[in-house]
Image: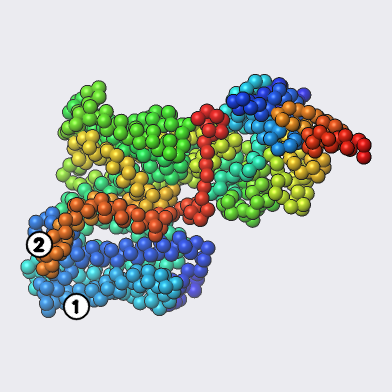
Amino acid sequence: MALLEMASVTKQFGGLTAVSNVSFSVGEREIVSMIGPNGAGKTTAFNCITGLYPVTSGRVLFDGTRVDGQPPHRILRFGIARTFQNIRLFSYMTATDNVMVGAHWWMKERVWDGAFKTPRGRREERDIEQMALELLDALGLGDRAGSYARELPYGLQRRLEIARALATRPRLLLLDEPAAGLNPQEKNELMALIARMRDEGLTIFLIEHDMSVVMGISDRIIVLDHGEKIAEGPPAEVRENKRVIEAYLGSGASQEARTA
Amino acid sequence: MTDLAVRSPVALLRRVTQPARSMGRRVEGRSVYLILTLTAAGLVLLGWFLPWFVGPFTAGTGFSPQDVVSSAPTGFATVLVYVMGASALIVVLSPLAELVARLRKMTLGVRVDQVRAIAGAAGLVAAVLVYVLVGVIREEPAFGVLSSTTITNSAVWLTMYGFGVALFAYGAKGLVLTRPNLAFAIAALPFGALLPLMFHQAPDFLLWAASSLAIYTLLALGLNVVVGFAGLLDLGYAAFFAIGAYACASLSSPIHGIHLPLWVLIFLGAAIAAIFGALLGAPTLRLRGDYLAIVTLGFGEIIPDLATNNVFNLTGGPNGLPGIDQPKIGPVDFGTSPQWYYWSIVAVTLISVLLLRNLQRARVGRAWVALREDEVAAAATGINTTTTKLLAFAIGASVSGLAGAFYGSMLTAISPDAFQFQVSIAVLSIIVLGGIGNITGVILGSFVLTFVIFWALPHAHEWSATFAHNFNVSAVGNINFPQYTYIIYGAALILMMLLRPGGLLPSRARRIELQTGVESESLAAVQGRA
C-alpha cells in the first residue's frame, strides 16, 4: 500500500492555481523524485503535504490516514519530516541543539523535569545529546557539533538539516532540492546518503533540479508543469516523454528532437 | 597539580596571575574581567564617599575612612588608612589603565597584574585591621568623636569588599576568563549575603533600595524568557506585574478579610500571573515583531486602566489597595526588619535564576530558541508553536507574579501608578542593556539600570549640592538635575547601545547576529492566516 497518497490535491492562492488536481502516491521504501520547471508547484506540493499550506481541495493521506488540515507539528508526528529549499536551520543554535530540537516531540521530559533537573530529565537529556552526536557523526558533522548552524559551510548546513529531520524519527523524508549548491563530490555523497537512508527503511521523496542526481537514484519520477502532473514513471521512461521535453525546452523542442 | 603543595605562596600567586590560556572565549572573558575590576573600583569609591551617598537621607554626619584620619591624626589606624588610600588609588585607576590600554590596542603585562594583586591584598588586610580597630576594639583616641559608627562600619565594609573583589579578579584571572558566570557568582554572593550586615541599624533605605533592585531583577529575568529566549517582543510586561501585585494584595489585606502568609502568596501570585500570561498571550499567537509589540503595548495600558477604574470593585480605584499585611514568620516580623525582606527576595531571585537557567538548557528552552530563530522550521520539526509560545508567556509572567507578591507587602500599599508603561520600558531597557537572552547579563543590567534610574538620577541633585557645599563650587550645586533626568538617562542608553550594541554581556548568539542580521516570518503568515 502507498505510504503517501495525494488525491486530487489543488492549492490556489487567490486566483492563481499553484497545484491543480494532482494525484500520485509514494510507496514504502521508494525513492521518488518530483521535477519540473521553476514555478511548477513542486515546493507548494511539499508545503501542502507538511501542512504549511492548507490544501484548497483534495486529500493527503499518509499510511491510510488523512493528514491534510492538520497543523505542521502534528503532521510531522505522523512520520513526515522535511528539509527546505532555502535552508531553514536554527541559525544561532549549535549543530547539536539543532538536532536535539528534532527529538523535541518524542522526548518524555516535561517542563518541571527541565526546571528541577529531575533524574529522569537529566538522563533523557544525556541520551538525546548522545543520539544527536551519533547522528552528526553519521552525517560527517561530528567535529562541528559545537558550531552554530550559521557558522557551517553551505554543504554541511544541508546535511545538518537532514540530521535534524532524521532526529524526528520519520518514515517519509521530503527533501526540497537537497543537491542545490553542492559540488560534484558532495552530490555523490548525498546520493550515497539517500540510498543508505532508504536501505535503513526510510521512504524518500525529493524535489531536485539536478538531473544526474534525479536519474541516478530515483525509482520513479513525477513531473509537474504549471501545477499539473504531466508525467510519472521510471527515469528512463520520463526522459523520453514528449510532454516532459516540451515543458523543459519549449514546445518546439520535441519536434526538433524527432526530426534530428 | 601536585607540585602546588611544595610551592611558596608567592609562586602560587605568580601562577594564578598568569594570563589565561583559553583564547577561544577571550572576548567575553575580557569584558567580564573589566566589569569585575570596575565593580571593585566602584565599591572602594562607594565606601570612601558613602557619606555623600547617604548624607541627604540621614540628616547627620557620616564618616568614611578619611574621617578616621582627620579624627586621629597620630593613631595607628591613620597609617592603615594611608595604606588603604594608596592601594585604593591603584585599584581605582587600574580599570581605567586597562581601558586606555585596550583603546590603544596594547595589553598590560603580567607585572601590572601582580602590582594590582598586591595592592588588593594590602588594602584588604589594612581594611580588616581598621575594621577591627573601629568595630571591635574601639580604640579610644582614634574614634572618640565618631558619632555614627554604623556608617563607618558600612564604609569600611564596602572598602574591604572592594579590595576583596579586586584581589579575586586579579588573582583568579583564569577563572574569571574561562568561567565568567561562576566568577560573577563567587564575587557577588558574599556581597549580597553580607549587605544587610554591613548596614545593620543603618538607614533602611539602603535595604529597601536593594529589595526593589531584586524586584526589578526578577521582572527582568521574567521578561527575558519572553523576549530573550522566545523572541516575542512584549511591551506590556508591567501588566503581569500589576496582576500579581493586585492578586496578592487582595489576598493579604483587610479589604476582603483574607490574610494569607507571604510564602503562600508567592506561589499564588506566580500562578495567577501565569494564567493571565497565557490568557493575554493567546490572542497574540499569530503575531510577531512589530504587531505583537503593539498588541502587548495595549495590554500594558489596559491593565493599569482597569485598576484605576476600580473594575469589579476589586482594585480600589486610583488610590489602590492600602493596608497590605506585613508578613510574619514565627518571631520574625518582616515589617520592622527590612533585611528579612531582602534575604527572602534574594533567595527567591536565586532560585528563579537557577530554575530559568535549567529551563534554558532543557527541552523547552531549546524549543523557545528554535521558535525565535525560525518559527516555520520549528513547526515543521514538530514543535507545537502555540503551546510553546503560551508557555513562554506563562513562565515569564509567573516570575513577575513573584515580584508582585513582594512588592505589595513591602510597600504595604499599591496603586495603579506603579504599573505604568515606564515600568515595562525600564524592564525592557534592563534586558537590552544587560545583554538580551543572557541571564548573567540581564542580572548585571538590572544592577546598573536600577542604580541609575532609582538612585543616581533622583539623588544627583542632592549629591551635587553636597559636592558644591564641601568644595565651595556653587555652579555645580545650581545644576537642576531633575530637569535633565530623562535626557541623561536617554543619552546614557544611546551611548551604551552605540558602544556595546549587544549589551554589557551579550549572549554568544547575539554577538554573531550583530555581525550578520536576521530575518523572520511567522508561521501564520506562511500559512496565509495572518
Q: Is residue A105 visible in the rendered structure shown here?
A: no
Between circles 2 and 1, the one closer to the viewer is 2
- Residue at 11% across, 68% down: B472
- Name the residue carrying label 2: B61
Front residue of B3/B321: it is: B321
Judge from the rendering whether residue B94 lies leftward or rightward of residue A118; answer left or right.
Answer: left
- Name the residue carrying label 1: B79
- Residue at 59% across, 37% down: B381
Judged from this view, the residue extending furthest toward the left is B145
Give the Cα separation between the discs numbered 2 and 1. 23 Å
Do the residues bearing badges 2 and 1 touch, measured as CB atoms within 8 Å? no
| Mark 2 surroundings within 10 Å by alpha-carbon count, few (fewer than 14), some (14 through 19), many (20 or more) | some
| Label at residue A28 | none
Judge from the rendering whether residue B341 lies leftward or rightward of residue B223; answer left or right.
Answer: left
Question: Measured along the vertical axis of the image, is residue B308 above or below residue A167?
Answer: above
- Residue at 19% across, 64% down: B49
SS type, badge 1: helix
Q: Is residue B435 visible in the rendered structure shown here?
A: yes
